[in-house]
Amino acid sequence: MMDREYIKRAFKSYTDAYDSSDPKVKLKIDHTYRVADLADKIARSIGLDEEDVDLAWLLGILHDIGRFEQLSRYHTFNDRRSVDHAKLSADLLHEGLGDIFVPKDVDYNLVEKAVRLHNVLELPKDLTKREKMFCDILRDADKIDILRVNCETPREQIYDLPPERFANDEVSDLVMQDILSKRSVNRQNAKTAVDPIVGQISFIFGLVYPWSVEEMKRQGYLDQMLHFESQNAKTRADFAHIQEIVNNFEVE
């Protein structure tokens, strides 16, 4: 049985080295614990044993471990303006944090791989069935909670953009095409302030497990994001269309 209390203490000790008065630091601490809890619940929903449930929970704790160093070095969570936070998280595990957080009886390579891949658009095809399962669990858990973060945190703080951009920008054509195809939005297609919001709504199309879809809808944050307020008529029309598509979506 994994010693979760030890891992929680180690995580607190690690994050205490950063400025806890910074709301961005607290944001990621809170997000980490929620993702870990969601990963636990997803793992239980598919009938995994306690050992594998613990592993799913651990992935949630570690998936954003690099966010704190990212903020310290670059003063932003914007990967485009700084560094790929998933890669940084995995690198930090490889450089020593793995020795602190990953029990010796746990498959370290699986942990590092799941952390490194948790934010990619599509998983590589060469993963083992077990690797893919844990990647899917972590990615589902992260996507569910990212919607909460976006509803509870001022957009200007997350995206470092002025409010008028969110009020007036349009949804890019390529982003809308992804939505119409019911697929996760490619971040490379995001050009406007509104595009990342649509991209996060599209997370529902990338969810793997039925429990994840039910939980994302149950929490209510998806619905809040679908009711995005804009002063741009085209954007309002696009969001009405997006809402219709999402509300009718189910995992195949």
Image (tube, rainbow, N blue to C red):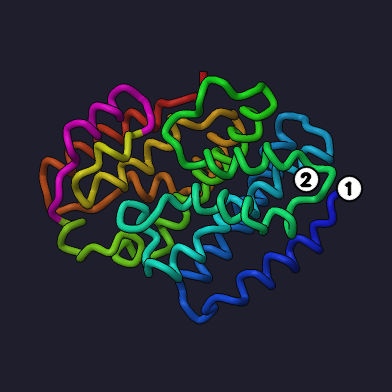
Disc 2 residue type (three-letter)? Asp
Foreground residue among 70 and 237: 70
Asked if the residue at tag 1 contacts the one at tag 2, i.e. Cβ–Cβ closer than 8 Å, the answer is: yes
Q: Where residue 235 appears, x then y in whole percent?
A: 17, 43
Asked if residue 182 is among those painted magenta in the image, a careful observer would answer yes
Q: Where residue 37 appears, x then y in whole percent?
A: 67, 51
Q: Where residue 224 appears, x then y in whole percent?
A: 38, 50
Q: Give the range drawn in magenta.
A: 168-184
Q: Where residue 192 appears, x then y in whole percent?
A: 19, 48
Q: Residue 237 carries which label?
A: none
Specify few, some or many for label 2: CA neighbours under 10 Å numbering under 14, 14-19, or 20 or more. many
Foreground residue among 11 and 210: 11
Q: Residue furthest bottom?
A: 21
**Which residue corresponds to mark 1?**
1
**Which residue corresponds to mark 2?**
54
Q: Is residue 48 above or below residue 41?
A: above
